Amino acid sequence: MGIKILTEHINVPGIETLEVYRKHGGYRSVEKALKTMTPDEVVEEVKTSGLRGRGGAGFPAGMKWSFLAKPEGIPRYLVCNADESEPGTFKDRVFMEKNPHALIEGMITSSYALGANTSYIYIRGELLFILRILEKAIAEAYAAGLLGKNILGSGYDLDLHVAPGGGAYICGEETALLESLEGKRGNPRNKPPFPAVKGLFQSPTVVNNVETIASVPWIVNNTGAEYAKIGVGRSTGTKLISASGNINRPGVYEIELGVPVEEFIYSDEYCGGIWKGKQLKAVVPGGSSVPILPANLILKTAAGEDRLMTYESLSDGGFVSGSMLGSGAFIVFDEDQCIVRNTWNYARFYHHESCGQCSPCREGTGWMERVLHRIEYGHGHQQDIDLLVSVAKQIEGNTICPLGDAAAWPVASAIRHFREEFEWHIKHPQEATAPGAVYRGQLAAATV
Amino acid sequence: MAETINAFQFSNKALAEIQRYISHYPEGRQKSALLPALHVAQAENNGWVSPEAMDAIAEILNIQPIEVYEVATFYTMFNLQPVGKHVLEVCRTGPCCLRGADQMIDLIKQKLNIEEGETTADGMFTLKPVECLASCGTGPMLQVRETYYENLDSEEALDRFLEMMRNKEVETPEWKK
């Protein structure tokens, strides 16, 4: 059992109320930061902690904070990205649902550090029921003097609001999120200017993921140096992992970064092994956007070292033999799963979610979906595989926002590691389209 | 015959809810309340947003109607056609499919005798497959209004769910209570 920074009290009955939350040490970081630290000192602690953005990109949070422009007389904003929409990711939803005050505490302490007097939590529209939970907790915090004017007598003012989206994956991208928060279509903005200079309402803005913000109170209470001691190398602290797919114990697990992947899959503390006594075929370790890896490459790197749950180890080998930690959405495939069907499913998702602004993404995602659909349904051509590789390559890096890359990587990696399975679908359409049919030829090498 | 315009009327509670959102934003940034207003309109109008409702929102927010239309058509949660009493928003994305979402969607079609996007003849159910709802560990799952129904992993579970829904009234959102 590793240290629990985010989930220590998450199953305490009544933790969603201010009273119980405070009884378990809640809002201590607000007292400490507002009464004994300058905003810059809070930023320094977060920098020292090595905390990296938990939404998927893994950019150092303290560094992102230090980029925030501070022109005189212009308001600054902190916006929490609670648009959790990456297929496979559900950690933020579970966290906010169970422990809303923990996010609110993080918002107050972080807003103070950034000098923001109005902050927003942008939550995906499907989670209106969690918006209600957050609003109830926010009302409690206002009543207790933890929000509003002159918080705890410190002279610091903060208003906190929750804003719902309307069902658009793209609004998880920070500039699309800001557009949406302004009541517009979720079209990502060109950068520069970056949100740190011109963000919400053209004012300097920091956008951070729920888990990132919720990690700040522990850092303030215990110091950044203590946080940096947890984890491995540049992967400091703990991470919430959303475990899904064909495992015995799906759910959200807080791990100390550095747990071996094999332990995470097979230990009863985490996933509890593959369900129904099946073999492991593949894993998408960081959300649908990141490369899929066959069983042998998820457990060991190409060099034969144990793969660890860290930013560095999961990406070891680049895209040739590695993947990414991403948002920590760990999707597990058993031996009965068809990689072609899954790849088509993801391609349909990205086509559906492309905002349509950039041609390579708008046209390319639809093209990949159509080609994969015909392969899956027994009408593929031999040249389709290379065609997919070529389309994916032309999308990647050629769009305003990373949705293009996110659409290209699952297709490119599935072909890279499971090419035989695609070829089998094309060469044996009747066999491949029979109910429940799965290619097992490559299994000997890929499954563990 | 004179042309009549059927203006959409929000209830007082709905108007108050929209005003509450407007108050969250700086002066002159009332357009930010557009998405919340569309959610309110949908809850007010039997689960869909009509052109008249969009025009009414434009008036409240003091923006052009086109600014409402372009947003309502971008976000997939807003239904722009009449829907059944209960809209079954079924997750069809990868992680749920690993746990049987495809089979569940097929079963729903069979049992309700409708295709995706259609409404049952009695107006009870609309089937609307959607993308990932952030409930991947508990798939197959679906959403109706503000509630998630999870682990629908067998025909029995689905039957129980449909039976329950047939006898269930439409949820009242918090602000309407």
Image (cartoon, rainbow, N blue to C red):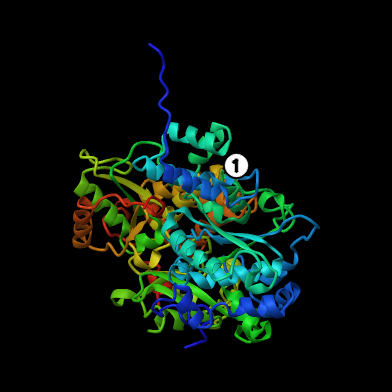
Q: Taking the image as drawn, is residue A327 in sight?
A: no
Of A306 and A437, which appears nearest the observer?
A306
Of A156 and B157, which appears nearest the observer?
A156
- In the image, what residue occupies the spot 66% across and 65% down? A157
For residue A447, which quarter of the picture? bottom left
What residue is disc 1 on?
A: A359
* Residue located farthest toward the top when viewing the structure as drawn: B1
**Place of residue A382 in the rendered image (x, y in percent of width and height, measured from the top left):** 45, 49
Residue type beneath disc 1 = Ser
**Place of residue A61 in the rendered image (x, y in percent of width and height, measured from the top left):** 66, 70
Q: Around disc 1, counting alpha carbons within 10 Å, would you say few (fewer than 14), some (14 to 19), or many (20 or more)?
A: few
* Residue located farthest toward the right when viewing the structure as drawn: A72
**Place of residue B110 in the rendered image (x, y in percent of width and height, measured from the top left):** 21, 48
For residue A151, which quarter of the picture? bottom right
Using the image, determine if residue B145 lies above or below residue A86: above
**Place of residue A367 in the rendered image (x, y in percent of width and height, measured from the top left):** 50, 44
Q: Secondary structure at mark 1?
A: helix
Q: Tell me: A130 left or right of B148.
A: right
Using the image, determine if residue A106 lies above or below residue B1: below
Q: Taking the image as drawn, is residue A75 in sight?
A: yes
- In the image, what residue occupies the spot 48% across and 34% down? B56
Q: Tell me: A140 left or right of A360.
A: left
Using the image, determine if residue A423 lies above or below residue A330: above
Question: Which subunit holds the residue at mark 1?
Answer: A
- In the image, what residue occupies the spot 50% across and 37% down? B57
Count every numbered label the image shows and give the total.
1
